[in-house]
């Protein structure tokens, strides 16, 4: 990472930029674009540059996906940032559609969070916007398009517009020998009717998105370079589900995972598990001790997803041959096993949120409601007071999974179903079908804050609300 502290601390440029950002809400985006480019031309080079452009992604020989990405790669470049050290990122949009990049899991002001609804500027076609922010907290974060896709399955998270953002602490404990970053993604989406596929219920359900292929990073299983390991090595895997709407269930044949962090935040209780479940937007950091020499498959525990390409080969030094797959022992994913028994502070206020589906019917699109309303009628969802602790008591009254994401804040999972827990800190929590989850957060980052389902289609179909500050 290049950095120039002398310029970072230049108050004139910061004030200029802040004034510009604060002066433009969503309605000011058009005006802001010209100012942003003028500013960018005068200033020194940014610490990082991301260019949004079309790209042809070769998942396997002869299998090419026509998509969009950052800097010509999928995932985009790894942004490895230092906690508390301000960075500038120039985002250039070389496409014909305005887009925006959200810094997922960071405490940053609303105007640079990368969500138009919170007042961050869109990056207009053929323009550059400079985003300046100070990354925190440490851990595995990511960045991705926060544009609306609607019915267009080429845009936003249906595309390759995502990348890892790792915030490093000042002093890195480094208890692992090396790290591997893998982002799961599903490709070739299409709208389908479950009634046509399954010939059965639910009869009133609307269209769903299904995918023909899947990958870790830019290659399907068997078509990328294997991950080469040595016996006895301890490898840190930073795993991300960057799919627009598919859950992933992962296993590494012959090995177990020790979960050390969820959504980048260290867990109170590290546990070995056979499988990892990640809903869209979730991250899991695991350490695998390489103690079973051979050539193995690390991939989806679901045969269908593995055959679509979701996996990578693990190859020990001096071992050759066909990669082996062993079906793992599976048990339901349970966040609470990584928590602890500490006493959770009482919230200042409990807020009940009910999530429901309005089925779109055969050939139609579903609609989603929060307490009976769909975005934008959900704005504001509720209003907070700076410094107070809120408990969201969430009920999923639908047969679908919903990874609920709160922007700009980290929350604590305090209850899953009837199981109380503490200490598991996340920014996205998956609600399984017909389930209840309680999360606590402290309103300590003033500014408009989105809460939404991270399924691209659910979000675009109304599953979004704005948390505001008094
Ligand atoms: Cu959802």
Image: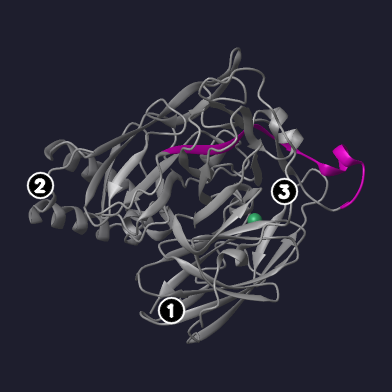
Q: Which residue is mark 1?
A: 384
Would you call the spot at circle 1 few (<14 residues within 10 Å), some (14-19), or many (20 or more)? some
Q: Report the disc number at residue 190.
A: none
Q: Secondary structure at mark 2?
A: helix
Q: Which residue is mark 2?
A: 7
Q: Is residue 193 magenta?
A: yes
The quadrant of the picture occupied by the C terminus is bottom left
Mark 2 near mark 3, Cβ–Cβ under 8 Å?
no
- Residue 221 % position (x, y): 62, 26
Marks 2/3: CA distance? 49 Å
Does residue 70 show up?
Answer: yes
Q: Nearer the viewer, mark 2 or mark 1?
A: 2
Query: Residue reaching furthest right?
Result: 199
Q: Is residue 176 above or below residue 406?
A: above
- Residue 469 % position (x, y): 39, 75
Mark 2 near mark 1, Cβ–Cβ under 8 Å?
no
Would you call the spot at circle 2 few (<14 residues within 10 Å), some (14-19), or many (20 or more)? few
Q: Report the disc number at residue 365.
A: 3
- Earlier residue among tags 3 and 1: 3
Residue 446 or residue 241, whichever sits in front: 241
**Taking 9 as reference, is 25 left or right?**
right
Does residue 246 show up?
Answer: no
Q: Which residues are magenta?
A: 179-203
**Taking 183 as reference, is 78 left or right?**
left
Q: Is residue 248 magenta?
A: no
């Amino acid at each position: 990472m290049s950095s120039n502290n002398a310029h970072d601390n230049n108050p004139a440029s910061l004030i200029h930029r802040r004034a510009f950002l604060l002066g433009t809400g969503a309605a000011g985006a058009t005006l802001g674009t010209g100012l942003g480019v003028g500013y960018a031309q005068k200033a020194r080079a940014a610490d990082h540059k991301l260019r949004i452009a079309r790209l042809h992604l070769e998942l396997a020989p002869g299998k090419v996906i026509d998509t969009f990405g950052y800097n010509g790669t999928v995932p985009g470049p790894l942004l490895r940032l230092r906690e508390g050290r301000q960075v500038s990122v120039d985002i250039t949009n070389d496409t014909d559609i305005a887009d925006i990049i959200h810094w997922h899991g960071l405490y940053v002001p609303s105007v640079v969070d990368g969500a138009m609804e919170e007042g961050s500027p869109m990056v207009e076609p053929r323009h550059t916007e400079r985003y300046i922010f100070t990354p925190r907290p440490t851990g595995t974060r990511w960045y991705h398009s926060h544009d609306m896709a609607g019915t267009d399955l080429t845009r936003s998270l249906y595309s390759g517009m995502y990348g890892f953002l790792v915030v490093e602490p000042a002093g890195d404990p480094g208890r692992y020998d090396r790290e591997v970053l893998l982002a799961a993604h599903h490709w070739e989406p299409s709208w389908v009717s479950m009634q046509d596929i399954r010939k059965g219920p639910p009869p009133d359900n609307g269209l769903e998105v299904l995918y023909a292929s899947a990958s870790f990073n830019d290659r399907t299983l068997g078509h990328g370079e294997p991950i080469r390991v040595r016996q006895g090595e301890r490898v840190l895997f930073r795993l991300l589900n960057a799919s627009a709407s598919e859950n992933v269930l992962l296993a590494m044949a012959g090995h177990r995972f020790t979960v050390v962090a969820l959504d980048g935040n260290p867990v109170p209780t590290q546990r070995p598990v056979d499988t990892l479940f990640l809903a869209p937007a979730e991250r899991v950091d695991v350490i695998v001790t390489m103690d079973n020499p051979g050539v193995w498959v690390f991939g989806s525990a679901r045969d269908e997803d593995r055959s679509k390409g979701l996996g990578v080969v693990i190859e020990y030094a001096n071992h050759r041959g066909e990669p082996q797959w062993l079906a793992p022992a599976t048990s339901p994913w349970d966040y609470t096993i990584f928590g602890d028994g500490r006493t959770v502070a009482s919230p200042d206020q409990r807020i009940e949120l009910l999530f429901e589906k309005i089925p779109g019917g055969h050939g139609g699109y579903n609609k989603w409601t929060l307490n009976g309303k769909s975005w934008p009628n959900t704005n504001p969802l509720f209003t907070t007071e700076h410094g107070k602790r809120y408990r969201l008591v969430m009920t999923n009254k639908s047969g679908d999974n919903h990874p609920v994401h709160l922007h700009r804040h980290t929350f604590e999972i305090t209850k899953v179903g009837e199981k109380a827990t503490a200490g598991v800190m996340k920014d996205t929590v998956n609600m399984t079908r017909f389930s209840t989850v309680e999360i606590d957060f402290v309103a300590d980052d003033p500014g408009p804050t989105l809460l939404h389902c991270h399924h691209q289609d659910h979000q675009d179909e109304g599953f979004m609300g704005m948390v505001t500050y008094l």
